[in-house]
Amino acid sequence: MTMLTPDQQDALQELMNVSMGLASDQLARFLDTLVHLQVPAMQVVRASDMPAQLRELYADKEAHLISQGFIGPAGMQGEAMLLYNLSSAKQLAAILGYQQSEVSDAEMLTDISSILTTTFLNSLAAQLGSTLSYSAPRQLNCQNNQLVERLQALASRWNVALQVNIQYQVTDYAFQCDMILLIPGTALQTLQQQLDDILQDY
Amino acid sequence: MDAHWLAMPILQQLNSGVLVLSTDYGISFYNQFIERRLGVPLAEVRHKSVFDVFTDLPEAWLKRKLDSVVALNAPTFSSWEQRPYVLKLPHLRPVSGGSDYMMQNCSMLPLVHPHTGETFICLLIEDATDVSIYQLELQRNMQALQQANRLDGLTKLYNRSYWEQLLQSEVLRAKRYHQPLSLILFDLDKFKQLNDDYGHLGGDFVLIELASFIQSLLRESDFLGRYGGEEFGIILPNTSQSGANEVAERICRQVAAHQLLFNQRIIRATISLGVAELNPHRHQEAHDLLQCADVALYVSKRQGRNRSTSYRDDLQKVLQKVN
Amino acid sequence: MSLTALICDDSVLARKQVKKSLPEGFAADILTASNGLEALDILSSQEVGVVFLDLTMPELDGIGVLEAIKARQLKCVVIVISADIQPEMQKRVAELGALAFIQKPVNSDKLAHIMHQYGLI
């Protein structure tokens, strides 16, 4: 399978950094608090290799998996997954200013994930000269050791995984989550074309 | 073909609700789907606040959602599984049972007016009532099925396979948290005799009655299961051997004193019990604990029934002597 | 007078984007560096008028470059171009003597406006 060339990899990383900057700016304004998001590492892997890599990261921890589908023009489509490793989802929600009585845990998690996913992907798509539509986010149940099985089931439907480790910093509290964009091979080709176009523009 | 004329008729006949709000929550538009269920013509409420027109809206929650759509220029969603409905509307399933209102999936999308650049929020309302009803039925059936899978048909106690699963997980839990765990196995004495004297119906009656009687003597946290024909087991989490001995002796006494009335005849039944405590170092698995309790039970029977025996290492020798 | 400009960013794309966004009237020799150390090498070997500086970079980040420029009292002016736009970071950068802070993706009008403001064009 052809993955990204070094130039494409560089361009995508840069676009993602910029998207994260824009997303955290928007989030900070919306939540009226200091939000800082960073993308220290992005890698493109075969979808089938992804579960094993994440198994290590989330071993023995309570993982929350939220999935949201996205689709754009020219075959760009996929599934954005946010993977949290939090002992308590409530903590995250409290940091982001949610009243606990207002909403259930599941709703808070899907809400926060959806905001993060859509603001980030919207910024990324805009830089690629495109737009995306989204399906409703869903929380996938993955208690105990089901995470890897879940990921394997998801991975089998897609070819390529863009694995993005995101570091959040909200006010004085920092935590991490992983965003995994699962896309089919055809969408990777579209992405490569878009990256090449941008590289050619400059 | 010029497709522009299509938009309005399709919007009106769409089998989903479309509600468009201004950024200050005023109603700009809703389609026929909503208009007919709400029973209020759009012209009457145009520009009124959505919170004045629809009753029981979760105001703080919805404002937060709508504000996020505008501020982030990104969609947001609400699922019936988390929040049954956003707009309180009737559904068209009069005999459905369950909820009186339409279950909804709602997408809230940012819209920008092509000429003025003004931002609006579009709420797409999908009727999820059918789905929710199927899901509820499915859940009920699954639960019933799961329950049925776990229970013994005659006594309604846990059946052997589920009880053994419970024992295994309790053994693991006790080991992990360094808590005591005890086990009682017991047998109905002279069951064959009972069957001969009172018929199989009488035998079954005794099993059913004793099961519910003994269950009533236990704590919520104890697990009573039917292990075999007339053999039963009790898992006692967080209980030491001496605590379990007391429980076993009490059950033994009370069963012996309990009178069962079957076809106007009084049946007195007794049981023999064996008690063992988990030894986390020597018992690798649930099976090892079961074996200890079984040895103790065997001793009870050998020594004349209607009694309880606590497992000790030298019981094997006692057994040999009796033999 | 011929001005020399240095674009310092670890991303090839970002360097190209900055280069392309420079206003038309801006006639300068353009040098590039892909991290802070490379930038400092260039700054110490030749006179550079303006530095377009990214913050998040390997080897030596933008803050490190600003600190070195301040410590060595180099004459160049610095315009920070970064995706990381936390207010604290902006404040820090300003304290270290950066002229302006521009959010990525760089907008050519905004860049021209700032350069005009500071008499660079």
Image: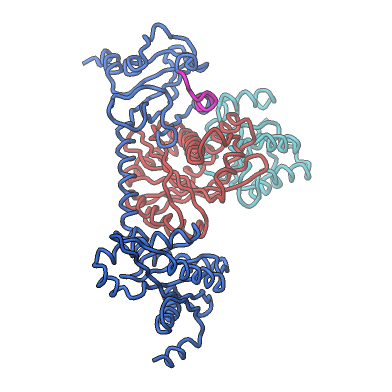
Chain colours: A red, B blue, C cyan
**Which quadrant of the view contains residue B136?**
top left
Task: Give percent across and percent down for residue B11.
Answer: 30, 18
Horizontally, is B44 left or right of B198 in the view?
right
Horizontally, is B218 left or right of B156 in the view?
right
Residue pictured at 55% horizontal, 25% vertical: B60
The residue range painted magenta reads B55-66
Of A2 and B298, nearer the camera is B298
Res. A1 visible in picture: no
Label total for image? 0
Of B279 and C70, nearer the camera is B279
Task: Give percent across and percent down for residue B27.
Answer: 45, 14
Where B1 sits versus A17, above or below? above
Of A90 and A16, nearer the camera is A90
Name the dominant secondary structure of the magenta segment. helix
Residue pictured at 77% horizontal, 41% vertical: C70
Where B122 sits versus B310, above or below? above
Residue pictured at 44% horizontal, 34% vertical: A125
Instruction: Return the residue found at the far top.
Output: B44
Locate the N terminus of chain A by quadrant: bottom left
Of B110 and A49, nearer the camera is B110
Query: Any magenta on residue C84?
Result: no
Task: Give percent across and percent down for residue B263.
Answer: 28, 60
Instruction: Return the residue found at the far front.
Output: B264
Task: Give percent across and percent down for residue A62.
Answer: 51, 53
Query: Any magenta on residue B61?
Result: yes
Instruction: Return the residue found at the far left.
Output: B1
Where B209 sits versus B93, above or below? below
